[in-house]
Image (cartoon, helix red, strand yellow):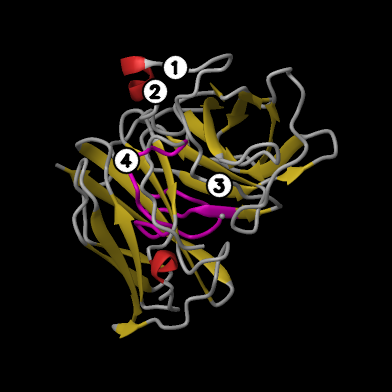
Amino acid sequence: MSLKKIGAFGTALAASFALAYGVAHAVAPDSARAGGGTSAHADSGAHGNAEGHGGEERGGEQHGEGAAAAAHIPGGLQVSERGYTLDLLTPRLTAGKDSVLRFAVRDAHGHPVTSYRAEHEKELHLIVASRDLTTYRHLHPVRAADGTWSTTTALPAAGTYRVFADFTPSAERDGLTLGTDLAVSGTYRPAAPPAPAATATVDGYTVRLGGTLRPGEESELTFTVTRAGRPVTALQPYLGAYGHLVALRSGDLAYLHVHPHQEAHGTETSGPAVSFTAAAPSAGTYRLFLDFRTGDKVRTAAFTVTAR
């Protein structure tokens, strides 16, 4: 698992990394080694807002430099924020096996949250990514009446993964993104992120990335989809848009969930290009995961980019 310019990277996704809702080095929707494998999309129910706001201190206001610093904390780096906590009820899985991942979002009193605002057609988005950024999953879990969420997934390799819950409680005006670690047992073979490249191929579709990601400065990124050398003009809406983008910073996996640039201008088209406005929070290496839908199937293209 909607078009609007993202400018706040300090909100739960980072007030200065405003990318858009699109992606990266192509992978297939149900298995997901983003560096040359596939990326799974489980549609079992719920999607959240990637524009959560970080840095608010529970129990009072922050002042001076502390408040300014907190306001620029990227989303997904904290397990608790603004009185909400991501409680991972399945802290470990086994590599290569279908497993049920269960979790709850708890309020300041420890009670599971049971009421959410639907954002981009879902109440909550769940993103799972390996620490080396070679595996990526965008999942839509199902919520039980008691507030427990669950979804089935299979993670291909052992290691440490980061789990991101992206949502907006009904009681809140702004969304947030919480993150926690997930252990996957098995033989661990660490890998480096794939080298930067301007194109990615998935299921016969070629996606070309145009534009340069710059730290602290907005720039436009455009993803153009072709097949057999011909422009693809029949992209289908996915989660309310023609492209869905998640960006993760290598090293700490700071999370950014953004929306297509066209939404802000009212010029959304069904391809071949989907554009985003982005401002990286810092210099460094990023992985961009672009979800797009054709022929009733969601595909993921993944790119490694360097901001400098």
**Location of mark 4 (residue):** 16
- Residue 70 tag number: 2
Secondary element at tag 4: loop
Assess whether residue 30 is covered by the magenta stretch: yes
Position of residue 184 relative to residue 248, above or below, is above
Residue 235 visible here: yes
Q: Are marks 4 and 2 in contact (CB under 8 Å)?
A: no
Q: Earlier in the sequence, mark 3 or mark 4?
A: 4
Q: Earlier in the sequence, mark 1 or mark 4?
A: 4
Looking at the magenta stretch, what is its main secondary structure?
loop
x%, y% of residue 177? 52, 36
N-terminal of the pair, mark 1 or mark 3, is 3
Question: Mark 2 and mark 1: span between their CA atoms?
Answer: 8 Å
| Dot 3 alpha-carbon crowd within 10 angstroms: few under 14, some 14 to 19, many 20 or more | many
The Cα–Cα distance between marks 1 and 3, rounded to whole angstroms, is: 24 Å
How many numbered discs? 4
Q: Nearer the viewer, residue 156 or 23?
A: 23
Instruction: Pinpoint residue 11: horizontal percent, then vertical percent.
Output: 44, 37
Mark identifier at residue 62: 1
CB under 8 Å between callouts 1 and 4? no
Residue farthest to the right, as pictured:
145
Query: Which of the pair 152/188 is nearer the observer?
Result: 152
| Lower sequence index among marks 3 and 2 | 3
Q: Of the residues shown, which amino acid type is indicated by label 1? A: Gln
The residue where tag 3 is placed is 49
Is residue 96 shown in magenta?
Answer: no
Alpha-carbon distance for marks 1 and 4?
A: 20 Å
Mark closer to the chain start, 4 or 2 = 4
